[in-house]
Image: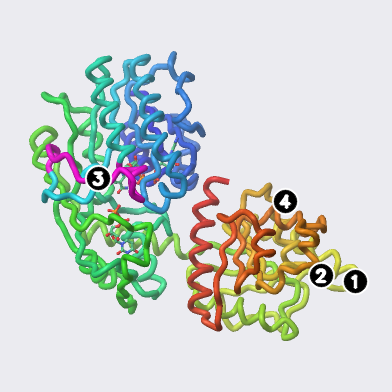
Amino acid sequence: MRILVTGGAGFVGSHLIDFLLREGHEVICLDSFFSGQKQNISHNFGNPRFSFLKYDIREPLTGFYRQKIDRVYNLACPASPVQYQFDPILTLETSVKGVQNVLELAIRTGARVLHTSTSEVYGDPLEHPQKESYFGNVNTVGMRSCYDEGKRAAETLCKDYHEEHGVDVRLVRIFNTYGPRMMFNDGRVLSNFILQALLGEDLTVHGDGRQTRSFMYIDDLVSGMNKCLETDLPEWGPINLGNPEERTINDLALAVIHSTSSKSRLVHIDLNDIPSRAGDPKQRCPDIARAKKLLGWEPTIDFNTGLDKTIADFRGRLENRPHVALFCKEFSARNSMVQQSVREIAKRLPGYEFDLIASHTDSDKEENPRIHIYRTKNNSVFSRWFFFVSAALKAKKLHRKYNYQIIWAITIGHGAFAAAFFSWFCRGKVPFLLSVYERNITEKMIARGRITSPIYKFIFRHAHRWQVVGDMSEIQRSLLKNDRAVIPVKFDGNWDKLAGNTKELFQELEILATRL
Ligand code: NAD
Ligand code: UDP
């Protein structure tokens, strides 16, 4: 069969595509890369039965109207809170306009469609476990609404296109799923816990950890989705796919610590301190009687087996930790505050390798083996003024090997200019974080409320995020107008706090990287 998979570069989609190719089908993967990653599908690029199209399903799928399409799996939609809250309007539009475009395509081609809905349509459920007949308890104006209400509207569209136009569309409501290729830092509980345990960091349990979830291994989900699309169903309606084995988040954390043999501990974070988690459901567990009856399906992979496979995948990927290209012209005692910041922050961020590109350093080797020193040539009077060129060229060479995920500069001098220049080399596709001390944003730079120097303008244009350490004055705030990009952080000598803020920014930038 010729099968279209929307959202195929995401976690679930990439596993589904591997399965469909193994079954001998021809697969077209369509994805906007909003939250998906090329490496999830790159192993299929040489396969003649696989093709890829970068496309946003919010646009009509007219290009496919005259093609033979037998099946469509519609997975396109950012799925984790960090991802969908990044652009809530896009998320809602993807579930409404996007799903309508898929259903219009089905009318034109006669394709059978499987739409992936979610357990989130039950919201914070008042009925437990959740049966398909339960209508849910969802807030229309909360942090999760763009996703939850979007998915609910999508279900309505599927029903109406089925009744009005006879589209053969199937609906699955997916409960929490885990497995290899889950994105690092996407905020989901299992990816967070595994990463934290492998890096020896504290496991961040939200609230008292007594809220429950049930976790299904990815292979079980893929077989359930396939069965749902290929079975002749005697009745229409949504079908829950999930693993009914329910566990508390505390138990989950302990299981991860045990399976990774980690020395990490659990820390409980007050839910009031995590605004993005407002409305966090207290319990969730699927009733899968309908899937059993209609599809003859139930999960077969036990939790510990799935967890071990996922941990092995995370371990493998961690061996290639993301590299940060760090630009800093002087890394010597003369510049001790910068030196101390890099050392203290790098110590607290074990998930990253730091390639420090400098013209002057105290030594060739740092005590921390994750800080690698690369010196630019330093034998002419021009070296100072042309650091931006030599450093950017050095980084460009290293980029081929390390595929930088983040560009980072501390202070707004030569290092920042070099970082901006490298960012320009990369056509803005590698996210650039500029960390500056508040006192370094000077009146001279701001002269008459405008950035006067072309060099500062160039730096300002290229930095994706500004981390401003200290209390900013009004004039500084007026200079750094773009609120979303400027993240002020108080320091007061607390390195844990500064490193925590830097880590959050790195994580945000890694997610941003897939969209640049
Ligand atoms: P994911 O974010 O890894 O994958 C979603 C993919 O859709 C990404 O590759 C993204 O780039 C793409 N995408 C987003 N908006 C798009 C658009 N407008 N046009 C084209 N592509 C777009 O998420 P996932 O975990 O693989 O989830 C896949 C589907 O399953 C989603 O619809 C999600 O709601 C549903 N689901 C997943 C889970 C889970 O636990 N993973 C649970 C319930 C439901
Ligand atoms: N959670 C947690 N620590 C984390 C991430 C999540 O305790 O680092 C909790 C979260 O508050 C929720 C549960 O784990 O109660 C599942 O979160 P996830 O985002 O994975 O899925 P969802 O809330 O969408 O079911």
* Label 3 crowd bin: few (<14), some (14–19), many (20+), radius 10 Å: many
For label 2, the SS is loop
Residue type indicated by callout 1: Ser
For label 1, the SS is loop
Tell me the CA gap for discs 1 and 4.
24 Å
* Relative to 326, 156 lies left or right: left
Residue 368, image quadrant: bottom right
Give the image location of residue 352, x and y in percent: 52, 68
Give 52 or 345, whichever is nearer the viewer.
345
Query: Is the residue under label 4 in contact with that under label 1 (CB below 8 Å)?
Result: no
Question: Which mark is nearer the camera, 3 or 4?
Answer: 3
Tell me the CA gap for discs 1 and 3.
66 Å
Our reading of the magenta stretch's main secondary structure is loop
Q: How is the image coloured?
A: rainbow
Tell me the CA gap for discs 1 and 2.
8 Å
Q: Is residue 370 magenta?
A: no
Tell me the CA gap for discs 2 and 4.
20 Å
In the rendering, which numbered label is found on residue 138? 3
* Relative to 208, 19 lies left or right: right
Any part of residue 36 in sight: no
Give the image location of residue 355, x and y in percent: 63, 68
Question: Which mark is nearer the camera, 2 or 4?
Answer: 4
Residue, disc 2: 377
